[in-house]
Image: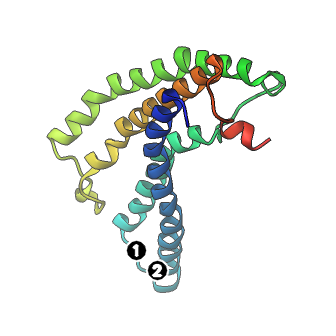
Amino acid sequence: MAHPLETGARALETLAEAVGRLVAWLTVAMVLVMFAVVVMRYAFDFGRIWIQESVTWMHAAVFMLGAAYTLRHEGHVRVDIFYRRFSPRTRAWVDLLGTLVLLLPVTLYLLWTGWDYVADSWAMREGSLQTGGLPAVYLLKSALLAMPALLLIQGLAMLLLRLATILGVSAGPGPMERHR
């Protein structure tokens, strides 16, 4: 039976996992739409700005909403010259301190500074229809808040898991240790 720290962490991680798996499908849609744009433009001399803009929206969603999934699976860039040689407990301390000192403050800062920007966009129901683009740009700008919120939740899950490792109540290795 898993320790409550791990149970809580795994519950928090389900959000990053679900969102990550969902937005991964946007990469397939992005390729198909981009292929259609190229064929329509060069074979039929036909194009629409809103179709091209949709590729940008999907690209933004994949990166912004998939960041927490990447963090959960430790797919981010890490220069681990020393880290890989550390014991699991020492790695847990490094991750815990990095989360407390870097990840959580940065995500809170992004939420705080982005709030007014996104709220203003929602207030004016910002769109790009005037130029033939997509309506509801405010939905895309909402990803500027969704990304740090998802990273914050995943960061809290990481804190719980690393704390479980430090306290010696961890039932098993995290994603990084499973892949070694």
Q: Earlier in the sequence, mark 2 or mark 1?
A: 2
Give the SS element for disc 1.
Answer: loop
Task: Please report the residue visible at 15 percent of the width from the left and 39 percent of the height from the top.
Answer: 123
The residue identified by callout 1 is 47
Give the SS element for disc 2.
Answer: helix
Image coloring type: rainbow
Extreme residue toward the bottom, this view? 44
Residue 139 in the image: state x and y as whole percent. Answer: 28, 48
Residue 40 in the image: state x and y as whole percent. Answer: 46, 80
* Label 2, residues with CA under 10 Å away: few <14, some 14-19, many ≥20: some
Would you place residue 6 above or below residue 106 in this image?
A: below
Would you place residue 99 above or below residue 43 in this image?
A: above
Q: Amino acid at mark 1?
A: Gly
Res. 1 image quadrant: top right
Judge by depth and name the residue closer to the eye, 21 or 42.
21
Residue 142 bears which disc, if any? none
Q: Amino acid at mark 2?
A: Met
Residue 144 in the image: state x and y as whole percent. Answer: 38, 37
Find out whether the residues at labels 2 and 1 contact each other: C-beta distance under 8 Å. Answer: yes
Judge by depth and name the residue closer to the eye, 159 or 61.
159
Left or right relative to 166: residue 119? left
* Label 1, residues with CA under 10 Å away: few <14, some 14-19, many ≥20: some
**If the image is split into quadrants, where does the C terminus sit?**
top right
Task: Please report the residue visible at 44 percent of the width from the left and 57 percent of the height from the top.
Answer: 58
Residue 35 in the image: state x and y as whole percent. Answer: 53, 74
Extreme residue toward the front, this view? 1
Would you place residue 143 above or below residue 116 in this image?
A: below
Judge by depth and name the residue closer to the eye, 128 or 171.
171
Task: Please report the residue visible at 53 percent of the width from the left and 67 percent of the height from the top.
Answer: 28
CA distance separating discs 2 and 1: 6 Å
Res. 145 image quadrant: top left
Residue 40 bears which disc, if any? 2
